[in-house]
Amino acid sequence: MSLKFNKIYFTLAVLLFGFEILIAKFAHDPIIRPYVGDVLVSILIYCFVKSFLPSPVLPTALGVLLFSYAIEVMQYFQIVNRLGLQNSKMASTVIGTSFEWIDLIAYTVGIAIVLYLEKVINKPTES
């Protein structure tokens, strides 16, 4: 599979990244920051991947979901501390430091939204 830049997915990824920054800086509540942020990050990663790879929707979505799960499992095993990066704010923010089962649900919801939107947007036209 060759790389092919997709402006629409890239624009969506940049917008979602902006929302993630706003959430991180300004949302200090028990719902938006931890859960909506996780839903959006799975969509963000999907859009970023689709920005460069013209891959099929379902395999891409499942790959992003598995990647998200893998990051969460690494949090369970405290990978940031094991790598000696506990003093790195960047590593702690990007990788995360605390495992939460509900985060797996949030990532799944994000990918479900992706699959729904891809189906609706790419619906074949009736002739």
Image: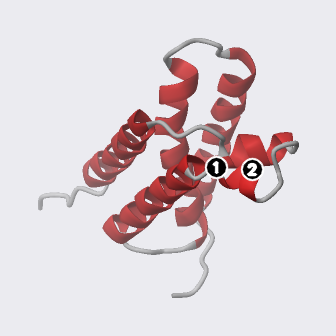
Q: Which mark is residue 78?
A: 1
| Amino acid bearing label 1 | Gln
Image check: 24 left or right of 50? right
Q: Quarter-wise, where is residue 108 in the image?
A: top left
Q: Is residue 40 above or below residue 29?
A: below
Which residue extends farthest bottom? Answer: 1
Image check: 42 left or right of 24? left
Residue at horizontal 71%, vertical 16%? 26
Foreground residue, 12 or 113? 113
As helix, strand or loop, the secondary structure at mark 1 comes to: loop
Q: Is residue 97 above or below residue 48?
A: above
Q: Quadrant of the C terminus?
A: bottom left
Q: Which mark is residue 103?
A: none
| Amino acid bearing label 2 | Asn
> What residue is shown with label 2?
81
Residue 12 in the image: state x and y as whole percent: 58, 46
- Mark 1 is surrounded, within 10 Å at the Cα level, by few (under 14), some (14 to 19) or many (20 or more) other residues, namely some
Which residue extends farthest left? Answer: 127
Q: Is residue 5 above or below residue 88?
A: below
Residue 120 in the image: state x and y as whole percent: 26, 48
Residue 3 in the image: state x and y as whole percent: 61, 80
Residue at horizontal 84%, vertical 39%? 89
Residue 43 in the image: state x and y as whole percent: 48, 47
- Mark 2 is surrounded, within 10 Å at the Cα level, by few (under 14), some (14 to 19) or many (20 or more) other residues, namely some
